[in-house]
Image: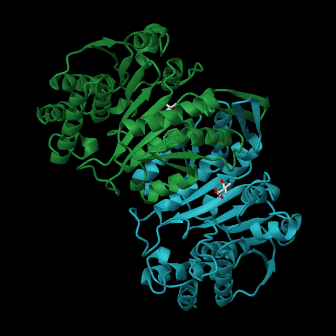
Chain colours: A cyan, B green
Amino acid sequence: MKFVMIEGDGIGPEVTRAACEIVKAAGVRNEWVPAAAGLGAAEQFGEPLPDETLETIRRHRVALKGPCTTPVGKGYRSINVRLRQGLDLYASVRPVKTLPGVKVPYTDVDLIVVRENTEGLYAGLEHVVVPGVVESLRVITKNAAERIVRYAFEFARQHGRRRVTFCHKADVMRLSDGLFLDCARAVADEFPFIQFEEKPIDNVCLELAMDPTRFDVLVMENLFGDVVSDLCAGLVGGLGVVPGANFGARCAVFEAVHGSAPDIAGKGLANPIAVVRSAAMMLDHVGERDAGARIEASVAKTLQRGIGLTRDLGGDGTTATITRELIANLTA
Amino acid sequence: MKFVMIEGDGIGPEVTRAACEIVKAAGVRNEWVPAAAGLGAAEQFGEPLPDETLETIRRHRVALKGPCTTPVGKGYRSINVRLRQGLDLYASVRPVKTLPGVKVPYTDVDLIVVRENTEGLYAGLEHVVVPGVVESLRVITKNAAERIVRYAFEFARQHGRRRVTFCHKADVMRLSDGLFLDCARAVADEFPFIQFEEKPIDNVCLELAMDPTRFDVLVMENLFGDVVSDLCAGLVGGLGVVPGANFGARCAVFEAVHGSAPDIAGKGLANPIAVVRSAAMMLDHVGERDAGARIEASVAKTLQRGIGLTRDLGGDGTTATITRELIANLTA
Ligand SMILES: CC(C)[C@H](C(=O)O)[C@@H](O)C(=O)O
Ligand SMILES: CC(C)[C@H](C(=O)O)[C@@H](O)C(=O)O
């Protein structure tokens, strides 16, 4: 079994190395196929996301990715966005669950944010009408709308989830979110055994702040999903602890969604949990469900025991100490 | 002194009546000029937002507004949006402050959300390209961008606030939010005595969920502001307790941003705090600063004492009992 590995920039090499060790310790036998993206790739190949990287992922179908920094200037578009669009990774999935030992104001959060990953304002279509007047196009298509809502319902079905909440702003964007809402309703009809709810995005954000426990699966367009994913991550401890995944019909890329933390890069201080949990999702995806579940359980146990944790988690440990704990806490 | 009063629908008449009583008890001598908007207006005049209402506000400059429901169907656009655009109320201002006695996971929140109220995706420009493909235009102009950021800085200066955070998504919408960001930076230079910070909207939402106390004044475009306003309201207890205001060069409309709660309408059970606090903002705006401050103080005292509170606030009181408390707790 081969998985593509994009180490990424800054703390990327350190945290992805930790993930590799833990995957190995969990008994998975695989090879890692390295692929380049980010600042390093830009320096080496003059291109932050070389075609070869996309090709490698297309070939092996599954990749694990550390934080990649898009170089500023030169009109580079975000590597993350190009990766999603280039591989048609249309569904971003962010499981958001309260973790033991992580101090946050809410308990018992357990929701999934499903984000449409290819269109909306991320289509990248903008123009200057006259100087000082700019239009960006928010593109919504029936195909992409149906596809993402169907993805959310399929996900709910396969993971035993009971409700899908579609988030929109159809009272303001009557045509675009009107279309999206129509698609959502039509797809919901295909899943009469799963509860469907539709809600304006502002209400959703308010309710998330007041009581995030009432949500199950949330599905929405790209920019709403960007905001809600991070908001939800904040509710359970931030980007250092939540995993991320991007699925297409053909490929899937699992990623730590935090930054490359250049200030602590190379010092052995980085917290690898986000990428470790992303690796667990990857294992689950390829059918190594037992290994994935054991890694998730080890993360919970490690956080709960609170030994060897990195500074961002309130400890005084290092990447090495927390990795050792994560391996030690893997049960058979 | 005359203030326009839009009672609105559902619980609107009850909560605005409470606000009038409290304004009177605070010693303000004014007349209320009634104006119609909402379902009632649609039934009576065949139009949910009659021109005459806009005219009345233009004449008297200042209005207090209860919740107005936009009738569904017939292609009606949101009354709130039309009011803002019709009167060029370009700045929405939402003070978000932890209240005593209101149980929320965060303490010491004290921030202001300033939202551009006239353009972005609310421009209402959309079209069907081919069936199943819709484009909505997100319009950003230099004029509106500079105006709203300047408003935020002026607000900060006048209210002794120390930092303005501009929220954007310029890495994705390079042209539109690039323009907005350039404008924000240029305006920030005019206020060297106030700290300026720029931050992607997803990071802002994450930080709001993790630690909202670090923000002071936030400024952003229309749809971001819609979402962040409600998210922040959720952090301090929800729409039942936060005031809202919309300012233009000429007029200002102060409003409860909650819904019309038809289920409890007419039963005397509604919580009037949102519109009472909006009235306090209105008094402050017209120069009745002492009365405004006394009403705010009374709201805090009433919530803290916890007597006569309505059900949504955890009490078993009525609109009448809480209004009585709000009046009794007005200090001289
Ligand atoms: C880096 C940025 C363009 C990206 C996005 O907005 O999608 C990021 O915020 C994310 O969510 O992965
Ligand atoms: C009713 C709706 C159109 C409105 C908006 O989106 O602005 C509301 O959410 C608000 O914030 O006042």
Viewer-nearest residue: A62 or B21? B21
Viewer-nearest residue: A92 or B84? B84
Where residue B63 sits in the image (x, y, percent)? 36, 19
Where residue B165 sits in the image (x, y, percent)? 50, 47
As drawn, is A61 to the left or to the right of B206? right
As drawn, is A87 to the left or to the right of A281? right
Determine which quarter of the picture holds residue B303: top left
Viewer-nearest residue: A98 or B163? B163
Where residue A121 sits in the image (x, y, percent)? 70, 43
Which residue is found at the position 47% from the left and 21% from the top?
B249
Which residue is found at the position 79% from the left and 30% from the top?
B129
| Res A171 seen here | no
| Image position of B257 with respect to A115: above or below | above
| Image position of A20 with respect to A123: above or below | below
As drawn, is B71 to the left or to the right of A60? left
Q: How many marks?
A: 0
| Image position of B25 with respect to B231: above or below | above
Determine which quarter of the picture holds residue B93: top left
User: The N terminus of chain B appears in which quarter of the rendering?
Assistant: top left
| Res A37 seen here | yes
User: The C terminus of chain B appears in which quarter of the rendering?
Assistant: top left
Where residue B286 sits in the image (x, y, percent)? 31, 22
Determine which quarter of the picture holds residue A332: bottom right
Which residue is found at the position 32% from the left and 40% from the top?
B241
